[in-house]
Each structure stands twice: as C-alpha cells, then as structure tokens.
Amino acid sequence: MEGASSWLQQYYNAMSCGMERLYTSGAHSDTTIMVGDRTFHCHRVILCAISPYFDAMFSSGMKESVSGVVKIEGTDAAVFEAILNYIYKGADTVNEANAEAILKAACLLQMECLQKRCEEFICKTLSINNCFDRWRLALWHCSTHLKQQSWRFIMVNFVKITQQDYWPSLEKDELISVIKEDDLACPSEEFVVEAVLRWVQHDQASRGSLLADIFPYLRLPITKPQFLVDIVRKYPCVKEHTEVHMYIDHAKNYQLLPAHRHDSSSPVTSYRTTSPYEDILVVISGGESPRPPYVRSKNVLAFGFNSRKWFRLAPLPYDPGIEFATCVHNNDIFVTGGGLHKSCFLRFRAKKDKWSQCRAKLKNGRRRHAMAACGNKIYAIGGYNSELEPGSKVQSSIEEFELGCSEWVEVGNLLTPVSSISASATKDKILVFGGETNDRNDTASVQCFDTQTHATSIITQLPLACKLTRATVCNNCTYIILYNGKIVQFDHRTSLVKVMGHIQNFDCVHYGLVHRRGCLLLMGGQRIIPGPQPVRALVDSMLLYDVRNQRVIMLNDRIPSPRLVDSCAKITIEKKFLVTEYTDPLPSSTSTT
C-alpha cells in the first residue's frame, strides 16, 4: 500500500504541476472567462472535469461553446481568481475574507469539492455574531453541512443569542423555527416565552398582530401556573390581544385537569431534549411466553422518546398476574386487578420513581377489565373473575376511587357485562368499547358511563363485534385498534364512529398502545398466524400510525424482547431516574394463573 500511495502521489504532483504551468503560461487555452473587468484564459477540458456547470455549458451547443467566451455575473474577479488557483494549483485559497463569496460562486459553478471546503472553513469560524447570517447563507445555497452546523450552534447558544442586538431583527418565521425546535437549549420554557415577548415589544405596533401566529409554538402548558397569570398582567401586548388568551387558557386547563393531561398530543406539551425531564413510554410487566405456564417479570421498562433508549424503572412490588389494568392520573400510573391478585391496587409515583401498595382494595376482584380517570377519581370497569358462579364471571360493576380517600366505592353498572375491553375518558364520561359477554360472544356496543349521574347507556356500535381491543385518546377523538388491524375513530364531539385505516397483516392481541404528537404507537403483543394449526408468536416490533395522513410507519426501535404487553403508559419523568439502561435478563418469575 505504501508503494501504491507513493506512485499515486507522484502522479497527482505531476498532474498538478502540469496544470499550474498551463494556467500560468496560458498555453493551449481555448476559452476566455470574463468576470467584471478582468479576463481569464482557461482550458475547457479542465473546467469541465471539475465543474458540472461548465460541462453542461460547453456540451449544450450554447453560444459560449461556439464563441469560447463566457461571461460570469455576480462574482467578484478576485474570488474567481481564487477559484482558478484552487482548480489549477490545488491551492487552499479559502480564508475569512472570501469564504462566503467563494461558497456562493462554488454553488453556482456546482463545484461540490470546493463547496465542502468552504463549508468546513465557515463552520470552524461560527460565532454568536455570525451564526444566523451563516445559517441563512446555507439555506440560500442548499449547503446541508453548513445548515446543520450553524443550526446546532444556534440551538446550543440560544440564551446568549437572545441577548444580542440582532435578536429583535429576526423575521417571524425564523423566530418560530427556533422556538419550536426540540433541541433548543433553554433554562426554562418561561425564558423562551419572555424572549419572544421582548422580540414583540421591540416593534409592538407591527408585531402585536403576529402573536396569534407565534403563540401556538410556545410550550405554555409546561410553564409554571403563576407565570401564565403574570404574562397577561406584565405584558400589555398579551392582555390586549384576546386571540392569544385561548392558548393561555388551554395551558391552564392542561394544568388544572390532571386526569386528561396525558391525552394531549400537541408538541407544546412535550419536553425538549435539553430539559431535565423526558417523555417516556412505560411498559409494565408482560408475559414472555404465549401460553401457560406464563413466564412473567416484575420489570418496568421505560423508553425515552428523545434519547431513543430503554431504561429500567423501579420494579413492581409483586406481579399482579395476567390481564391487570392501568390508567394515568397527574403523571402517576395506577394498577388494579390481575390474575394473581384480583383486588390489587398499586400506584407508581413518577416524582420519586417509586411504587407503593395502596391500602384500598377493589371491592370486586377482576382481570380483563379497563381503567379510566375523570376529575379527581379513577375507575375500574367490568372484567372477569373466574371464582364467580358460571354465567356471572363477566362483571358489570364499576368501582370509583377518589384520590385522597381510603376505599373503592361501587358506583354503577354497565348495561352489558363485558370483559377483555378497552376504555377511554372524555370530560366526565367513560366510554367502553366492545368486549366479551357472559355467553362468550363478542359485542360491538359502545357503552357510556356518566361519572356525574352514574347512569350507563349504549350510544353507538363499532363496525364489528370484538374483544381484546386497545384504545387511546388523541385530538378530541378516541382511536380503537381492533385485532385485525382496523383503526376505528370515535369522535367525542359527534359520537360518530368510522374506520380510519387498516394496518395490514396485523392480527395481533395483547399489544401496547399509546399516542404521541398525533401518532398512535403500537408495540409488542402476540401475532396469530392463521393456518391449519394457528401459530401464536410473540413480537417485539414498534410501529406508528399517523392519524393526520393515515400512514403506517414501522420503526427501527424495538421493545427489549418479544412479549405480551399487559399495559403501557406515556408519562414524564426526571432524567435522573433514567440511568440504568435495560439489558435483557433471565425472567425473574413464573406464573401459571
């Protein structure tokens, strides 16, 4: 290899010296380049070899290819001379004074190698004072590397940038591009809001009307409650602009309604990558074998949506057994029931990464049931209890637990007792979808339990009778995933049901479902492969369904091992608890219930 490098280097040196001699002497030149008031004698073959721009010009039959005279506009003669020194001599002619001008000319001449050299030089000289100018330069000339590096510089140095004289001179669209970025390094969301309002106050007469365009991108829901009150009082432009009050009220409702906080799919309720908090997907327990004897685990796994890594959280104090239920209230996860402990009641406190066994027990032990949160209360609905008499094993009872109280209270009944159900909550009502009845038939009914009157009604029907569905709330709708992959939408405002999409070759049960940023995220489960002897295979896949464009996306991410997913939830946790990355261990326990 040394010999090859040596002779190859000798070849490059000889070629470079020869080209420099041709350029210096002007020998054999066959084209004239006119730039400003200067003339350069060049060689077509050399220009074409390095510049697709010249290659296309001299190959197209244009007048320049006939006359041999080319006039280049918009480039300084000194800059073009530097480019010719690069072409003919291999000289590194890029410096602080000409880097941007050479980059512009290199983009025009489509000289990718020189463009990259300019980008590298400019990236090394990025500063607080020039980062925005160089980001704009990269956008204008489609310089990918420079765009990425200058944008990263802006994100990292956001705090210092807001203190510069040019901060108020940003265009509205540039400001929005910055504040909506997940990677923005900011001490708090309050800091971002105040930086934006200073920008508005710089020219309040013309910028006050822009508040309605900017406020949708501010992460007001995760600011402090007092701050939401103060900005209306402190900033007259906000107080006078009633249209932005809607976004402030939305943020207040987000904080005042903890039962429905996790239903939000807006990016403004997500924490940035630089925050001490991270939005996570929590997978709780789960069967690691498709049939009895079930291999199970007390592990609680967390997938960081920003870090794209799996971590261990505090494990369950005990395994509730198969088919327990969960719900989220105020960022805490509640667990009830299960095949081993039918009256189980556990709580995960996200602020402490700690599970506790609640003293209150369910009045009616159950599994295959559903849970939901409304107001300051959580509910356990329906389900199955194998210890009850035949014909009554599937339950209709609905139990309520008010946070801060000491016991569960039976408050109502479903019209049709069902198990293997899914449920969702909207305002003060709980919706229960499908399920299996006591006669082992599936139902298509959507039952509605009013948490104020304790009355239950059947309000509509699903497209087909089904059990083992999953449901989640997203953008004022509940999305129900059926075992055959059909995605059904229930509109909370109209109670209309319609099929929104279909995941091909799904045929899956006991999978997990959450939503985030307008997408449904499905993971794990048991795929039933049809045939004379159906195969039941556990899967570790994760896929997204984008409800906006009805598109299915298979993710590269996987759950740590193929498994049934008893339950999963989306919450936020301090990063200090995300320290132990998950490695797949041997199962810790076995259950046959």
Image (tube, rainbow, N blue to C red):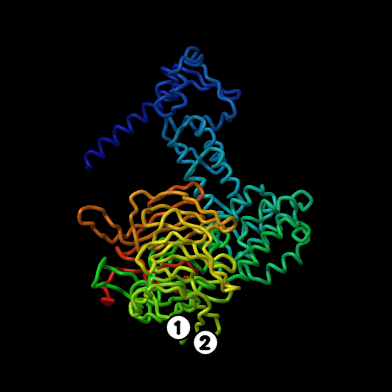
Left or right for 232, reference 188: right
Residue occupying the far left of the picture: 532
Above or below 526: residue 505: above
- Badge 1 crowding class, 10 Å Cα cut-off, few under 14, some 14 to 19, many 20 or more, is some
Above or below 60: residue 107: below
Q: Position of residue 169 (x, y in %)?
A: 69, 49
255 vs 308, nearest the viewer: 255
Tags 1 and 2 touching, CB below 8 Å: no
Q: Position of residue 323 (x, y in %)?
A: 36, 71
Q: What residue would you read off at disc 2? A: 406
Q: Quadrant of the C terminus?
A: bottom left
Give the mark toward the camera: 1 or 2: 1
Left or right for 300, reference 424: left
Q: Position of residue 341 (x, y in %)?
A: 36, 81
Q: Residue at x 45, y 22 (%)?
A: 56
Residue 562: name its quadrant: bottom left
Above or below 217: residue 304: below
Above or below 218: residue 325: below
Identity of the amino acid at label 1?
Lys
Q: Secondary structure at mark 2?
A: loop
Q: What residue would you read off at disc 1? A: 363
Q: Secondary structure at mark 1?
A: loop
Q: Position of residue 173 (x, y in %)?
A: 63, 47
